[in-house]
Image (spheres, rainbow, N blue to C red):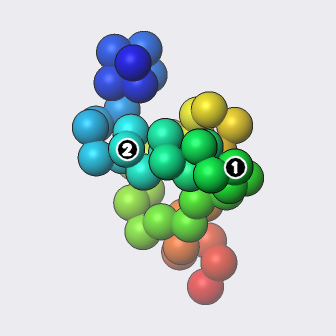
Amino acid sequence: MLRERAGIPLIDGLYIAYASYVRCSALITNDNRMKSVLGVEVIALSSLL
């Protein structure tokens, strides 16, 4: 569903779907292309350094 509706690659979709499933509000990643969906905010690691 995420790949089709939001254009998210399979692996990114798995990370975001699981984060949503376990009720994470944010996901910190080094992948600047990952999008925020399903109520999970994607935070770039570089913005925290």
- Is residue 8 depicted above or below 25 in this figure? above
Q: Point out residue 44 in the picture as x, y percentages from the top left corner.
A: 54, 64
Identity of the residue drawn at 26% across and 37% down: 10
Is residue 43 visible in the rendered image? The answer is: yes
Q: Residue at x 58, y 34 (%)?
A: 37
Residue 5 to residue 18: above or below: above
Q: Residues within 10 Å of mark 2 (few under 14, many from 20)?
A: few
Q: Which residue is mark 2?
A: 14
Q: Return the mark for residue 43.
A: none
Disc with the residue nearer the chain's start (2 vs 1): 2
Residue, x 53% and y 73% (percent of image)? 45
In the picture, the quarter occupied by the N terminus is top left
Q: Amino acid at mark 1?
A: Arg
Does 47 appear above or below 10?
below
Relative image position of residue 22 (x, y in whole percent): 62, 52
| Three-letter amino acid code at the position of disc 2 | Leu
Residue 28, given in percent of the width and then of the height, sits at 56, 66
In this view of the protein, can residue 7 be seen by the observer? no
Question: What residue is disc 1 on?
Answer: 23
Q: Residue at position x 41%, y 25% from top? A: 2
How many numbered marks appear?
A: 2
Question: Which SS class for mark 2?
Answer: helix
Does residue 18 sit above or below 28 in this rendering?
above
Left or right: residue 26 versus residue 29 is right
Specify the quadrant that holds the C terminus. Answer: bottom right
- Secondary structure of residue under mark 1: loop
| Cβ atoms at labels 2 and 1 below 8 Å apart | no
Of residues 34 and 14, which is closer to you in this image? 14
Q: Give the residue at the far front of this rendering.
A: 22
Label 1 crowd (10 A; few <14 / some 14-19 / many >=20): few
Horizontal side of 24 relative to 28 (left or right) equals right
